[in-house]
Amino acid sequence: MKVKITDLERLILSSLRKKYSEADSQLMADVLLFGQLSGKTSHGIVRLFVGNSSILSQTPKGKPEIIVKSKISSIIIGNGNPGMLVGPLAMKEAIRIAKKEKIGFMGTKDTHTSSGCLSYYLEKIASENLIGIIIAQSPPSTPVSGGIEPLFGTNPMSFGIPSDPRPFIFDMATSAISFGALLKAKTLGQKIPTNVAIDKYGDPTTDPEEAMQGATLPFDNSYKGAGLAMIVEILSGLWPGADFSGLNEQGGWGNLFVAFNPNLLMDVKEFKEKVHLLLEKARHSKTREGATVRIPGEHTLDKRNESLKLGMIDIEDNLYHALQKASKG
Amino acid sequence: MKVKITDLERLILSSLRKKYSEADSQLMADVLLFGQLSGKTSHGIVRLFVGNSSILSQTPKGKPEIIVKSKISSIIIGNGNPGMLVGPLAMKEAIRIAKKEKIGFMGTKDTHTSSGCLSYYLEKIASENLIGIIIAQSPPSTPVSGGIEPLFGTNPMSFGIPSDPRPFIFDMATSAISFGALLKAKTLGQKIPTNVAIDKYGDPTTDPEEAMQGATLPFDNSYKGAGLAMIVEILSGLWPGADFSGLNEQGGWGNLFVAFNPNLLMDVKEFKEKVHLLLEKARHSKTREGATVRIPGEHTLDKRNESLKLGMIDIEDNLYHALQKASKG
C-alpha cells in the first residue's frame, strides 16, 4: 500500500514515545525512516517490533554514558538503549572531536539492537566535510573460513567520503545476507537466495528460519569475506568492550564510529574536487554494450530523495498494520 | 632448485647495492625476502627486475622526504624511490607517532613500485603492540561495478592485530588476482585462473598478457569488491596526493600506513588476551567432517618461519638465474 511519509513518521514516533523521550524518539525515527525511504527496508520499520533484538523489546538500564578515554577517543556505554539511539550520539561526538583534533574515535558497547542503516550516519559525517568509517559488530552469524559455526556478526563496513554536489557513501555487510533481510524474509514468509546461508549441519538453505539456526555465509563465499568479518568483530566488538564471537555476551553489540578530517593529509577543497573527478570518470567509464556503471551507494541516496520528493512510499500491508498496532497497543 | 637463504639474501643485496646505499638495500632486501620466504612469491624477487615497475628499473630523483602535516600525520614523498624503501620509513614513523599520540597516520606518494607484502609491515607494527591498517593504491587494474575499463589498482587492504603468542595478520588484494601474480604467470609462461580477469573487450581470459591489457576483476566479482577497491583508491591514492584512476599520474602510487594504540579504547594487555581467546575459539570451531579452519594470515607466517628454520627455500630455476645475472650484470 502507499502511505504518506508524514503518517508513517507519526506512527513510528507514537510507537517509540511509549518507552523513550520525545527527543530520543525523534533521533531513532530519523534513522528508521532513512532505512525505509531509501529502500534498505531491512533496516527500516521491521526493526521496531520484530524479533528479540527489536527496539520496542528493549529495557534500558538508564541513559547512554560517554566514557572519555583520551583527547580523541571515547566509549559510549549503551546501557541497553537501542543502537539507533546510541548511533546518533556516537556520530555527533565523532564529528565534534574530529573538527577539533582531526580524528574522532568512538567505540560503543552494550546496545542489543541494530544501529540501523550506516549510510544514514555517513551522509551526515561526510556533509560536515569529514571522512567517516563505521563498522558494526552484531551477534554471531558468519563462520570463520572452513567452519560452519556462527562466530562473527553480519558485520557491515561502511565509508562516507565528502564530495560535491554530494558525498560518496559505500555501506556493505560482510555477510552474504544481513540479519535484517533474514528477519524480513521470515516475517513476510519469503525464501532467501541460494548461496547466502547454511543450516546448522553446514548444508545450503533458502529457508530464513533454518539460516537463523545455522549461519550466514561471508559475502564472497571465501576466506577474504570471512577475514573482513573477523576484523570487524575484533575492531568494533572486542575493542570497545562489546561482545566478540559470543565470548563476552554481557558486553552487548559494538560499533566503531570514526571521523577523519581530510586535512590530515590534504586540503578539504582539493580532496572534494578530486573525489568528484574520480566519481565522474568512473560514471562515464567504458562498459560492455547495454551495461551500466553502478556507483556504490548512489541508489540508496537517490531512492531516499525520490521518496522525500513524492512524500509517499510503498509499504507492505502487514508491516503497516503491525506498525499501526504498535503505535496504539 | 633449493637455495640457501643466506645466498639468496647476498644476491638480492648485490643487485640492490648497484643503485642504493647499503642501509637502503638492507631495508628493501628484508621486505623482498619476507615475500619470497612466506610463499607470497608474487611479492618476492620477481619485483626486483621484472617489468616496468621493478625496483631496479627505477631512477629516484633524491631521497624520500617526510612532510609533516599535523602532530599525528605526515606524507612521505617517495621521489621515485621504490615502495619497499618508502614502506619501511612510513611504518617506522607510524609506530613512533602512535606510541606518543595514540594514532600515527602516514600517507605516501610518488613511488612507482610495489610496497611489497603488507604482512611484513603489519607483523612489525603489531609486535609493537599497535593495531596496523595498511592500504595501498597502484595503477588502474580493476573496473568500477558494471564497467570494463581499469580504474582502481589491485588495491590491497590489510590489518595487523596484536596478540600473544603472535599477532593476527590479514592481508588481501581487493582484485581477484594481484599484479604480482599476473607478472609471475607471464614470466613463467603460465595461465591464470578463470574468473579473475577480462581482456580489453570485457571477455573472460586466462592469458596474463591479455589480462594486463584488459582488467582484473574484483575479488568477489560483485559491487562490494569493486566498492572496496574504490575506497582504497580514494583513501590511499587520492588522499595522500598520489595517482587516482589515472587522473594524477605524476603523483605516483600511494599508500596509507596507520597505527592505532589499542589504549584508545582498551588496555593493551586485555586487548591482546581477548584477541587470543577469539582466535582460539575460531580455530576450534565446528566444521563439516574433514574440513579445517583457516585463520587468515597464519599460513604466511608459518611458511616464513619454516623457511627460516630450514635455512633453505625452493625457487624456480629461471628466477634464480635471473637474480644471479642481476647481481652481476
Image (cartoon, coloured by chain):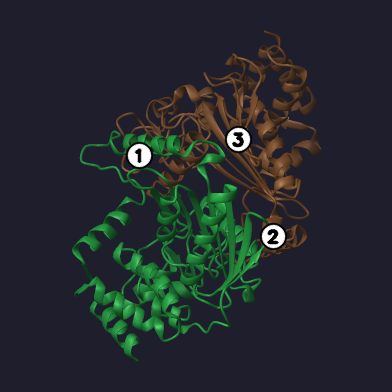
Chain colours: A brown, B green
Farthest-out residue, bottom: B329
Viewer-proximal residue among B239 and A320: B239
**Image position of A295 with respect to B280: above or below:** below
Q: Which residue: 63% across, 54% down?
A: B72
**Image position of B106 with respect to B207: above or below:** above
Mark 1 = which residue?
B279
Q: Which residue: 47% across, 67% down?
A: B115
Screen quadrant of the N terminus of chain B? bottom left
Question: Quick one: SS at disc 2?
Answer: helix
Labels 1 and 3 in the same subunit: no
The label on residue A275 is 2
- The amino acid marked with disc number 3 is Lys
The label on residue B164 is none
Callout 1: chain: B
Question: Quick check: A121 left or right of B297?
Answer: right
Labels 2 and 3 in the same subunit: yes
Question: Quick check: B25 left or right of A280?
Answer: left
* Mark 2–mark 1 distance (CA, rounded to whole Å): 38 Å
Screen quadrant of the C terminus of chain B? bottom left
The percent coordinates of residue A178 (x first, y second) are 51, 35
* Mark 1–mark 3 distance (CA, rounded to whole Å): 26 Å
Question: Quick one: SS at disc 1?
Answer: helix
The percent coordinates of residue B195 (x first, y second) are 40, 60
Which quadrant holds residue B32? bottom left
Callout 3: chain: A
Considering only order in the chain, which callout, 3 or 2, is on the residue closer to the N terminus? 3
The percent coordinates of residue B254 (x first, y second) are 57, 66
Q: Which residue: 75% across, 24% down?
A: A26
- The amino acid marked with disc number 2 is Val
